[in-house]
Amino acid sequence: MTAFHLAQVNIALPVAPLDSAELAGFVAALDPVNAAADAAPGFVWRLQTEDGDATAVRGFGDDRIIVNMSVWESVEALADYVYRDPGHLAVLRRRREWFPKMAEAHTVLWWVPAGHRPTVAEAEQRLSLLREHGPSPEAFTFREPFPAPGGAQVRKDDDWMCPA
């Protein structure tokens, strides 16, 4: 068992309300994509309400923003799911239909002690650190990952499709 796990948050501003026809494809994909994440090797935890997803969670200074936050055993485990799971890839490829590109960083990774469940306030702080100072051991990206405290260097696969 490792002493640290990887936390991640990504946020998005939908083009329309979640109950709109424009977001129907995204909403239909939520349960299968979340179930695949829950079953993925290295998955530890994800933020969710009693509805089974986090679409009702608010934060980041805008009530329209959707928050996705999870914890994984490693950067590699998260990357394997994000960039290799067929269901997640299908949603990722269609994301511009549902979410315009954000002007600032919208995804951040950071290490947490094993067993810790990050809060939205913690995620806001980490995203702010990344936006203000760039990647660091406290807030980083897939493109510039940092090892866990006291851990080995993170393996960067050449085939990680790290979208901007």
Image: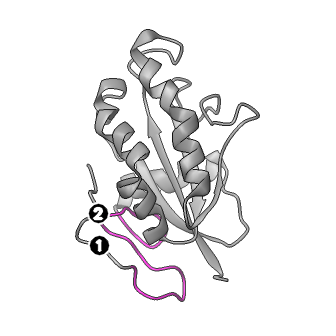
The residue wearing badge 1 is 157
From the top left corner, tell me how far across and down residue 112 is, in percent: 62, 69
**Helix, strand or loop status at disc 2:** loop
The residue at the point 29 percent across, 30 percent down is 96
Q: Judge from the rendering whether residue 40 lies leftward or rightward of residue 141; answer left or right.
A: right
* Residue tagged 2: 160
Residue 13 picture location, percent across and down:
42, 28
Is residue 4 something one can see in this rendering? yes
Determine if the magenta segment contains residue 151: yes
Q: Tag 1: residue type? A: Asp
Badge 2 amino acid: Trp
Which residue extends farthest top?
21
Left or right of 26? Residue 98 is left
What's the distance in space between the residues labelled 1 and 2, CA to CA?
6 Å
In x, y percent, where is residue 133?
Answer: 36, 61
The residue segment tinted magenta is: 135-154
| Residue nearest the viewer, comparing 121 with 66 | 66
Q: Looking at the image, do the residues carrying marks 1 and 2 touch, with CB atoms under 8 Å apart?
A: yes
The correct choice, above or below, for 58 with respect to 161 in the image is above
Question: Residue 158: x, y in percent?
Answer: 23, 71
Quick one: SS at disc 1?
loop
